[in-house]
């Protein structure tokens, strides 16, 4: 894909972030972020730990309240106090770094709980869809297992399935491979790749530069709460125009991470 | 040259080369010897301690007296049926109060851990309730309820000391159990709550389907512990005139000048508390997969 976001820059994307600021006490985490994620587009958020990637994702899912600016979902403001956050979260899927599966429920129950209880699907329908997705992603024989019987990679795949099973408008992935042993990263990224191929709209915070380059249409580089550079993935990662981006990528290269 | 009489000392002359299968056999023998030695020590220690206690009791100058006063077979068989039937009152009160305590405790704990501003006055009331009822001796509460409330002569309020005493028990134990549930709820990590919100549940659904099931599972051992205490404390209803097992045994003892009925009552309490204690051990065993929540 070659579109560089120009066609959605007018605020008609699936997710539009407009001049968003967010502080925790004295600490300003987001200092005015503008970003659009278009239909079927995957945007990777890169940047050092503490640069604001997670906070931005959490603001989009209304797990944090923005201070300034607005966020739009399908052109509608979701950061207005009158908006029901539950209705917004039903349209979004969120995957946490630490999986956050429900340890008292089995794999299939983890996947169906949200869709069934929030009234998006009938139990039977949700279970059918859950089984079908588990089978498709190589977890068909694990539906009755409790999460602590699964490897980290399997748990994160279940968490991904849980997030996209109800067909959300967009997926928000918060460093979904950072808590995994290196040999388990591949299986999780493979699933994300498949979702991208299906046209899922995604906003992905990640430390995996190779993956960002391959899967993301655009990459946004965050530093100290500001977006310093946004552009086509290959351009930003291979020939960044900002010195800060170059320094950040250089540090990763030295660490053997990119 | 003298050698200590230690089993490994003779083998020290011929230490097998590294990788030699002989060392595995040697370790095996040493392990078995250690196990045998441990069993022998446990046995000897038991004989000395328990035997010593038995000798001390049975040879004491007062033992014949105690035996006839507390362990009289005749007095036991005479009083046991009456105490057993009185014990059903204990069982019934326990079963009903237990259910009330569970519901009350869970309700108070949920209110106290809520963050909704509208529930603020209820959070205050919950805190006051827990402080007050946890802090007053149960026996005093039963007195106050059993004798104080009928004295108010209010219309439609029960005056039966059995009911009033049971209410006092339920309120006292409700406050203990509320604190147990509250600790359980607070021990569930915030990320579980967020995870519930992220899959589209509202706050109440998240509490119901995500937080509470994990919290309740986690506090089952202290909860059962409180129930064992409750099973025994039903005997406190005796102070407002309820003739349950303890009171019945006391009446029998006073009538016959023999304390054996009290021992009979004690055995009945043990008959219900010991199974509960074993159940507690069973569900809190360390390798229980249903405990879940490794993280």
Image (tube, grey):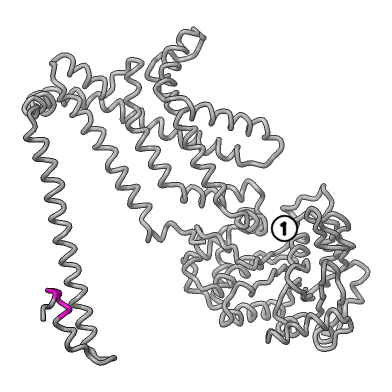
Of all chains, the one bearing label 1 is: A
Disc 1: CA contacts within 10 A as few (<14), some (14-19) or many (>=20): many
Residue B118 horizontal side relative to residue B266, left or right: right
Residue stretch rendered in magenta on the structure: B4-9
Which corner quadrant of the image does residue A210 belong to?
bottom right
| B87 vs A191: above or below | above
Q: Is residue B58 above or below residue A201?
A: above
Decide which of B162, A137 is in the foreground and name it.
B162
Provide residue A30's location: percent of width, then percent of height.
Answer: 83, 63
Look at 75% across and 52% down and name the residue there.
Answer: A85
Q: Quickly name the residue at label 1.
A: A89
Front residue of this view, candidates A19 and A72:
A19
Spot the residue most to the front. Answer: B1
Disc 1 is placed on an element classified as helix
Depicted B18 relative to depicted A44: above or below: below
Left or right of A196? Residue A224 is right
Q: Position of residue A255 (x, y in %)?
A: 69, 84
Q: Is residue A241 left or right of residue B19?
A: right
Between A243 and A235, the one nearer to me in the picture = A243
Residue B262 x %, y %: 20, 25
Which quarter of the figure has residue B182? top right
């Amino acid at each position: 894909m070659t579109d560089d976001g120009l066609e959605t820059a007018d605020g008609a994307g699936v997710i539009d972030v407009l001049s968003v600021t967010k502080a925790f006490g004295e600490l300003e985490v987001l200092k005015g972020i503008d970003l659009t994620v278009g239909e079927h587009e995957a945007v990777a958020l890169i940047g050092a730990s503490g640069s604001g990637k997670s906070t931005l994702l959490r603001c989009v899912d209304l797990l944090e309240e923005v201070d300034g600016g607005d966020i739009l979902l399908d052109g509608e403001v979701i950061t207005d106090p009158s908006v029901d956050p539950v209705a917004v979260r039903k349209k979004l899927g969120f995957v946490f770094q630490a999986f956050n599966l429900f340890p008292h429920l089995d794999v299939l129950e983890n996947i169906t709980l949200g869709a069934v209880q929030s009234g998006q699907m009938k139990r039977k329908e949700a279970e059918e869809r859950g089984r079908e997705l588990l089978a498709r992603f190589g977890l068909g024989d694990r539906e009755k297992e409790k999460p602590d019987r699964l490897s980290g990679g399997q748990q994160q795949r279940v968490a991904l399935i849980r997030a996209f099973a109800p067909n959300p408008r967009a997926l928000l992935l918060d460093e979904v491979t950072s808590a995994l042993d290196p040999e388990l990263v591949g299986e999780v990224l493979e699933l994300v790749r498949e979702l991208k191929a299906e046209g899922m709209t995604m906003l992905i915070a990640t430390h995996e530069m190779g993956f960002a380059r391959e899967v993301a249409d655009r990459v946004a580089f965050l530093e100290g709460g500001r977006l310093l550079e946004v552009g086509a993935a290959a351009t930003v990662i291979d020939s960044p125009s900002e010195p800060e981006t170059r320094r950040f990528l250089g540090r990763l290269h030295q660490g053997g991470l990119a | 040259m003298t050698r200590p009489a230690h089993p490994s000392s003779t083998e020290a002359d011929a230490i097998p080369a590294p990788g030699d299968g002989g060392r595995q056999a040697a370790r095996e023998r040493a392990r078995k010897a250690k196990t045998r030695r441990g069993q022998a020590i446990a046995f000897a220690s038991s004989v000395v301690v328990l035997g010593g206690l038995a000798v001390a009791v049975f040879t004491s100058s007062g033992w014949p007296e105690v035996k006839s006063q507390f362990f009289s077979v005749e007095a036991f068989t005479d009083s046991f049926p009456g105490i057993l039937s009185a014990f059903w009152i204990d069982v019934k009160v326990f079963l009903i109060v237990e259910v009330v305590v569970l519901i009350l405790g869970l309700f108070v704990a949920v209110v106290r851990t809520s963050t909704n501003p509208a529930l603020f006055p209820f959070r205050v009331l919950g805190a006051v309730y827990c402080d007050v009822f946890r802090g007053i001796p149960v026996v005093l509460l039963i007195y106050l309820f059993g004798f104080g409330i009928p004295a108010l002569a209010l219309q439609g309020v029960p005056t039966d000391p059995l009911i009033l005493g049971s209410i006092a028990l339920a309120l006292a134990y409700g406050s203990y159990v509320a604190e147990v549930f509250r600790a359980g709820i607070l021990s569930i990590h915030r990320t579980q709550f967020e995870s519930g919100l992220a899959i589209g549940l509202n706050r109440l659904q998240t509490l119901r389907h995500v937080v509470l099931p994990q919290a309740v599972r986690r506090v089952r051992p202290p909860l059962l512990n409180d129930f064992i205490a409750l099973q025994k404390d039903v005997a406190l209803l005796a102070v407002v005139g309820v003739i349950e097992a303890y009171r019945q045994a006391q009446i029998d003892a006073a009538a016959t000048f023999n304390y054996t009925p009290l021992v009979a009552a004690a055995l009945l309490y043990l008959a219900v508390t010991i199974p509960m204690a074993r159940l507690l051990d069973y569900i809190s065993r360390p390798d229980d997969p249903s405990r879940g929540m490794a993280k």
